[in-house]
Amino acid sequence: MKKVIKAIDLKVQRLQNKTIWLQNAQKVLENELSKLRLTEISEWTGDQQKLFANYYDELWKVKSTIAYYQRIKQLTLEQVALMREYQQAWALLKQDKHFSAGELNQMASVYEGILSASAKNLDQVLAALSSHTTQMTDEQRLNEINRAGDRLDENFNDLRRYNTENQILSIRRSKDLADTRITKSLYGFQ
């Protein structure tokens, strides 16, 4: 009986050893499977990061392009307004009897200088837009457009200041109250 119990005990130990070995093998397989899944997840995550990086790069390019067009639109409208104000002021100055022909010639040369500078600044904007002419990054291109735009703003402010100075000078030269009223109405003052 003792031998039978020892034999059964040995068989049980062998079965336990096989069970432990199978459990260890199962753990090794599970670990390998987990590594494989982690690798798959890591690759998927990397692919997603690349996909979103490309997506955000494209969005950044679109944003830059929109910024170009908004600034260009603003500068174009400003140039149109500058020309409109020049034309209105020049038409009024030519009608004003308080300025001599020599003074009008001098005013015309000042206006010509302002208009020439604004056209030059607009040309610089167009040169910055042309990728064939100038090679620069989007940031550099937008900075160049903004610098030229700032100079165009200065031209517009110079034009307005000069128009105001001429209007004030004309009003000061008016001889009496009736002449002052006519001059003020000519320039749109109350």
Image (cartoon, rainbow, N blue to C red):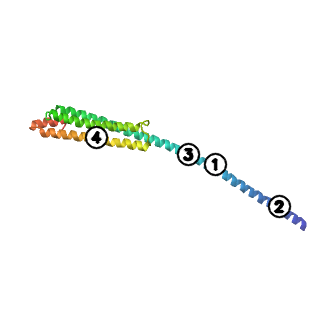
Q: Earlier in the sequence, mark 2 or mark 1?
A: 2
Dot 4 crowding, Cα within 10 Å, few <14, some 14–19, many 20+: many
**Closer to us: 145 or 88:** 145
Tell me the residue that label 4 is attached to: 155
Tell me the residue that label 2 is attached to: 14
**Closer to us: 39 or 126:** 126
Q: Earlier in the sequence, mark 1 or mark 4?
A: 1
Tell me the residue that label 1 is attached to: 40
- Quote the CA–CA distance across marks 2 and 3: 53 Å
Name the residue at 27% across, 34% down.
84
- Quote the CA–CA distance across marks 1 and 4: 62 Å
Closer mark to the observer between disc 1 and disc 4: 4
Closer mark to the observer between disc 2 and disc 4: 4
- Quote the CA–CA distance across marks 2 and 4: 98 Å
- Quote the CA–CA distance across marks 1 and 3: 15 Å
Where does the image place residue 75, in percent across and percent down from the top left? 34, 38
Left or right? Give the position of 180 relative to 137.
Answer: left
Amino acid carrying mark 1 in the image? Glu
Q: Secondary structure at mark 2?
A: helix
Q: Secondary structure at mark 1?
A: helix
Where does the image place residue 93, in percent across and percent down from the top left? 18, 34
- Quote the CA–CA distance across marks 2 and 1: 38 Å
Left or right? Give the position of 45 relative to 17.
Answer: left
Q: Earlier in the sequence, mark 2 or mark 4?
A: 2
Quadrant of the rendered image containing residue 117: top left
Tell me the residue that label 3 is attached to: 50
